Amino acid sequence: MPRAVEYPNGHRPVRRRPAALVAARAPDEAKPGFPVIAVLAPVIAAGVLWAVTGSMLSLVFAALGPVVAIASMADAARQQKRRAKRATATRAAALDELRADIARRHDGERRLAWHRSGSAAEVLASTPGSGWHGAGARAPVLGRGAVASALRVGGSPADDDDRTVLAAAALLEDAPVTVAIDGGLGFVGTPDLARGAARAAVLQLAHASAPGSLEIVVPGAREWTWAAALPHTRGSARLVVTDASCGTSWAGAPALGESCARIAVAPDAGSLPPGLRTVVRIETPGRAVFDRPASPFDRAFAPALVSAREAGEWAVAAAAAAARGGLSADSIPGVVPFEELAQPDVRPFDRTSLAVSVGSGAAGAVELDLVADGIHALVAGTTGSGKSEFLLGWLAALARSRPPELVSFLLVDFKGGAAFEPLRGLPHVAGIVTDLDDVEARRAVESLRAELRHREHVLRDAGAREISALPASVVLPRLVIVVDEFQAMVERFSELAPVIADLAARGRSLGVHLVLAAQRPNGVVREQVTANCGLRVSLRVLDRGDSTAVLGTDAAAALDPERPGRAIVVKSGSAPVEFQAAYAPTAVLERLRATVRGVPARRPWLDPLPTRIAPHECAALAGEGGSAARAHEASGITDGVVFGVVDEPDRQRRSLAVWRPEADGHVLVAGVPGSGRTTTLAAVAAGFEQRHGAGTVVVAGGPRSTESDILHALVVSIDAGVSAPRLLVLDDLDSRYRAWDDEQRQAMLELVGRILRDGRALGVRVAAAISAGGSLPYGLREEFGAFVPLRHASRGDLAHAGGAGELWSADDGPGAGQWRGRRMQVVDAGALPPAPVRAVPPLEVDERPCAVVSATPAPTRPRSAARRDATRSSSSPAATPRTGPRSRSPRATRLSSWAMPTRGRRTGCSRRSSATGGASSCTAGAPSSGRSCASGAFRPCSIPVRTSAGRSRRERSAAGCGPVAAMDDPAPTKWPVQ
C-alpha cells in the first residue's frame, strides 16, 4: 500500500475514509493439455473386445475416444474465452467506478482546502476587516496546482492500470498551494512577477491578522509605498519584507523566530537572505516552481499575483475599517474622563437594556450592553493594565444612568475588597464580598442558589417568562455579579464553579449577569460559561494565547503597557474594537455616592454574622434579609428564649436562635475552652429569667455543700410535685465533680440525673455545658433535647460531637456555634449570676472541751492542737507557745474514734474531752472539707461558725456533743460552713 503523503507546506488535511482498490486481475487459466489417456483408453478397450469376440465392429469404439477428446478440448477453450471477456469487462467497470469515487472525493477535498486557505483573489473581493476576529494566518496561498491528497487507496497494485489509479489518487489537482511563513519565504524572478507574488502573500496575512496583533514592515522604496496605508503598524508579531530588486538590504533585519516572519524578493536565489526555508521561482505569470524545498512531485503551479494598484486600494479600505472599529492607534484618545462621557438615554422602568458608555474609540463612544451584547461578560487584563479601574467605571456608569430598582450589584473581590471599596454606599450595591474562607464559600453557594429560586418565584407569580416581561409594579432589578480575580476564586473553591455555570446558563431569563474578570482566563473559565459570555473585553495581557482565548485575536498582547485602560472589546459576531476605558477617580465616585438616591437594593448575599451581638441588636439583625414585619415578629417571641442569631444563607435571611423549653427540653452546650460556653449559658439564663421572672434561674456553684443543697432542694421539690418554671445552670458538667471522691461524685451525678429525668414534667429545665470531646455518664447525654455545638478543635471532632462538620471554622470566635444545623452567634448577655448563698446564724462556742468529727482521726489530732495553741497565743499575749512534737495543751487528751450518723451515712468522728468533763462541741463535714481545722474556731467570740443545716438535735445528742458544726471548703481566715 502507498505510504501517506502530506502537502508540501506541512498542512495535513482532514482524514477521509480510504477508497478500496478493485481486486487484481485474475491470472489467465492455463490451456488444457492433450488428453492422452482419454484417447488411448477406448483404443485399448476396443482391442481387448475384438480379441475376445473377434468382431470387427468393436474396433469402431477405438475411433470414438479421440473424437470425444478433441470435442472436449474445443468446448473448454470456448468457455475460457468467454470467462476472460466477462472478467475484463467487470474489472474495467470497477476501475471506472473507483476513478469516479476518487474524483468525487477530490472535489470535496479541494473545496474544503480552498475554504480553509482562501486566496489573494478572495481577499481582494472581501470586505476589509472581515477576517480580523480570527486567529491569524501563518500559511498564505501562493497559487493553485497539484498537491498531495489526503485520500488513501487500499490494496496492492497488480498491473499498470492499478498503478495509474494510485498515482491519480495521490495528487489533488487545482488545489491551493500553501506554505508556512514561519521559516521565511523568498520569491525569485523578474521584479514585477516576484513583487506581485509577495504582495499577494502580504495581503493575505494582513487580512487574517487584526491591527495591533501584527506589525508589517516594508521597504521604503517607491515600489512598496502602497503598504504605507496598512493599519498594521504595531503588534506582538512582525512581518518584515525585504526587496533586493529595489536596492534594500536584508542586513540588520530582525532574525526569524516565533514572533517574526520574513518575505524576501530577489532577482536570483543568491541575493536572498540566508536561512529561508522556502524559495519560489516565478518563471511566467502562469508558472512557478519550488526551488527550496523541491516539490515532491516536481510539478509547477500557477502563482497568485496582485498588482500594486489592487494592493493599495485594499490597504486604504483596511485603514478605514480599522478607524471605524477603533483599531487605529492614532485616533484613540489617551485619557477619557468619566464625567465627560455622554451616556445613552434610558426610558423609565426599561428592563430591556443595560447600555452604557464605558470609553472612547476611534469612532467615538464605546457602549456595552449586558442585555443585547451577550448577557455575560469576560474581562481579561494583567496587573497594571487598568482592569479594576475599567470595572469601576462600568459600574459607576450603570449606577449613574439607572436607579437601584432596575439594576443592582454584587461585588466579589479576591484581592481583599479594595478594588470595589469606592462603590460602597451606593444604593445599587447589594453587597461587597472580600476574601472567602471555606465557610463563606459555602454561604456564597447557598446564597446564589437562593437568589435564583427567589427570582423564579417572582417571575412565576407575575406570570412572566423572563425579567423583561415583568410589569413596572414588580420590583426585581437586574443583578450584575462582578467577580474580580475569578481564577483565584475557582482554584481555591472548586464548588463555586458549578454555581457560576448554572448562573451563566439561566441568567438571561432571570436577569442575572456575570462579569468575570481574571488576569489569565484561559483554561480557568469553563467552556459552558464562556459559551454564554458574548461580551469579551481584554486589556493588556502578557501572553498572546490569553488574548486569543478571550478575543479570538492576539491583539491584546500588543497593547501599550504605558497606557492603562487601553482595551479591546469583541461583541457577539462583531469585529474587535480598540478603545480607551473611562477613568473615574475617587473624587468623582464620592460625588456620585452623594448624588445618587434610591431605595437600597435587596441583598442576595448577607454579611457574615458579627462577632459580638448585644441583646437589643437581635431583632434588627434577624430583620436583615427579611421584612420589617418579620423583624418585629422576631422581637416579640413569647414561647421561647432568644439566645442568639442564626445565619440562613439558603433563605437569604437571618433568624433568631430560640430555645423553647417546653418543646426542646434541656439544652447542652459543648466547645473548647474559650469558645463561649459560659457566655451561651449566661444568654440562656438571662432569657429564661426575663421570661419567667427573677429567682427562676439557679446556678450551681459555690462551696460543695451549697451545690449539694441546691441539687437536694430541687430533688425534694420534684419529689413533692412542685410545678414551677425553674432553670438549673451547670457549667463544666463533664468535669465538675472530678475532684470529689467517688462516693460523692456518684451521688451528685445521680441527683443531676433525677433532675433531668423527673424535673421536665414539673417545669424544671437544665442548661449545661461540657468541653469539646467531653463525655457524660451513660444516660445523661440522652436527656438533653437541644444541643449547641461551639468551636471544636477540628472538623472531625465537631462532626463526632453531633455538629455539622461542613460548618466548622478554625477562626470562630467566642459564641460562634450552630443551632439546628445552621451557623449562629450567641448573644453576649453578660456573666452568669453567682451561685446563691443563704445567710446562716453564727455559732459561738464557749464550752470546753469540744469534739471534732473527722474521718481521719490521726491527722486531725496534731492539727487541732496546733490550731488551739495558735488561738490561745493570739488571745493571751503573755502565753508562751510550746514547741516540739508533743507541744499541746495539758487539757488535750487522747482522741478516740466513734461513729455519728449523718444523712443516712456513717461518718468517722474523733472526740476530745477535758479531764474535768463538761459540755462538748462537734464539727461534722465531708472528707477533705476542713473538719480537722474546725477546733481552732471554737473559742469565745471567734470566727463565726455556721450551724449545720438539716442536722437534728437528736443527731447531735447521739453524737454525745453539744454544739455541732459542719465545715466545707475552709478559707485561710474564714470557713463557709453550713
Image: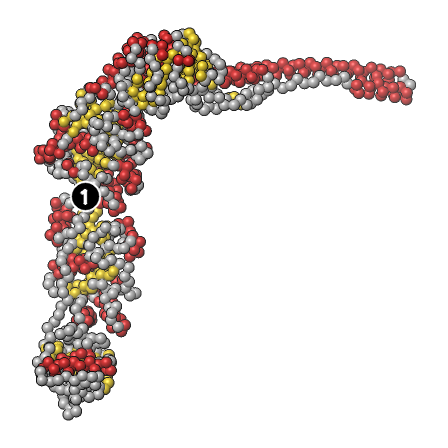
Which of these two is toward me, 96 or 325? Answer: 325
Residue 112 image point, x, y percent: 40, 19
> SS class of the residue under badge 1?
loop
User: Outermost residue toward the front?
Assistant: 251
Instruction: Give the labeled residue for mark 1.
Output: 606
Placement of 896 over or under 159, stated as above or below? below
Q: Can I make out residue 132 in this image? A: no
Q: Can I make out residue 216 in this image? A: yes
Which of these two is toward me, 416 or 345? Answer: 416
Placement of 593 over or under 316, stated as above or below? below
Left or right of 803 in this view: 882: left
| Quarter of the image where one finds residue 32 | top right
Q: Residue at x 23, y 86 (%)?
A: 896
Placement of 513 over or under 173, stated as above or below? below
Residue 166 image point, x, y percent: 53, 18
Q: Residue at x 36, y 10 (%)?
A: 245
Q: Quadrant of the N terminus?
A: top right
Residue 850 image point, x, y percent: 16, 85
Residue 700 image point, x, y percent: 18, 66
Q: How many numbered discs, if any?
A: 1
Q: Residue at x 11, y 85 (%)?
A: 879
Which of these two is toward me, 689 or 562? Answer: 562
**Residue type of the residue flagged with mark 1:** Leu
Q: Residue at x 16, y 25 (%)?
A: 335
| Quarter of the image where one finds residue 86 | top right
Placement of 525 over or under 675, stated as above or below? above
